[in-house]
Image (tube, rainbow, N blue to C red):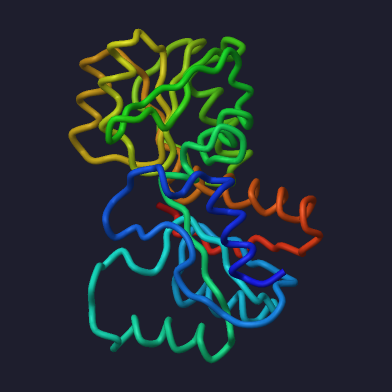
Amino acid sequence: MDILQLSHYLDNLLDIPSIDDAPNALNGLQVQNTGEIKKIGLAVDLCQATIELAIEKNCQMMFVHHGIFWGGLQPLRGSFYEKISSMINANLGLYSAHIPLDLHPVFGNNRALADLIGLNNLEPFGEYGGIKIGFKGTIVKKSAEGLAQELAEKLGSSVKVIGEGEIETVGLVTGGAADIIQQASREGLDAYITGEGANHHYHEAIENHCIMIFAGHYATETGGVKSVGGHLEQKFGVTTEFLDYPTGL
């Protein structure tokens, strides 16, 4: 199949037209190409490094969480020109899904993280832009340090814990969603997991008596692209490869 056919399928799978996002996210097909799609490179971020990895791995298309147009309208020069020209010269297409990938109930980032920690009794959680993009539920009771160690081992990232105690009820929203700590506290959750936060979120966690775990923006958002990639392999017989380029953040 070609990139237009595949993009149409992904638009429907991820419900792209009906989900609001940041204006510059431009969810969907961002860079077209020609020819048959045989291999798709999966990445969290579209950057020069992942473009070069995709070209090296003989991919005809990339499926990413953070696309190329976050800066909005800008001239084609400097590093932005380098990215665009590298893709066009290599006939490399690009499809991006931000919030639609975060909240997908089967293939989303938050569902992948929930499955990773064995979160049960799932309910929507974490309001962002009028919709709940994460999950809350229960786990087998364990210490904050125990859960943090489990996350570190399974995600391969450094993990920061704010607070201490036993954890049984958990809310999670992947990426940079530390502001949702107050929602977790209001709902009486023992802990809240996200990717990263700011200095003031430390005090909010302590004062609201809710353990907060930072497991890395990049690390917590690797699950969605992998899940969609696995689905596309089964559905269409294409090959996919995860292009790992961790930021450590």
Task: Name the residue located 49 percent from the left edge and 17 percent from the top edge.
Answer: 123
Q: State the image quarter where residue 232 is shown.
A: bottom right
Tell me if residue 67 comes above or below residue 57 in the rendering: above
Q: Tell me the quadrant of the picture where the N terminus can be found.
A: bottom right
Tell me if residue 73 comes above or below residue 171 in the rendering: below
Task: Name the residue located 34 percent from the left edge and 18 percent from the top edge.
Answer: 184
Viewer-closest of 173 and 84? 84
Tell me if residue 244 comes above or below residue 188 in the rendering: below
Q: Position of residue 135 (x, y in %)?
A: 47, 24
Viewer-closest of 119 and 163? 119
Q: Position of residue 34 (x, y in %)?
A: 62, 82
- Outermost residue, bottom side: 89
Task: Name the residue located 48 percent from the left edge and 74 percent from the top edge.
Answer: 31
Q: Position of residue 124 (x, y in %)?
A: 45, 21
Q: Position of residue 229 (x, y in %)?
A: 67, 54
* Total numbered badges shown on the rendered structure: 0
* Residue 170 shown left or right of residue 75 in the figure: right
Viewer-closest of 231 and 138? 231
Task: Name the residue located 35 percent from the left edge and 86 percent from the top edge.
Answer: 81
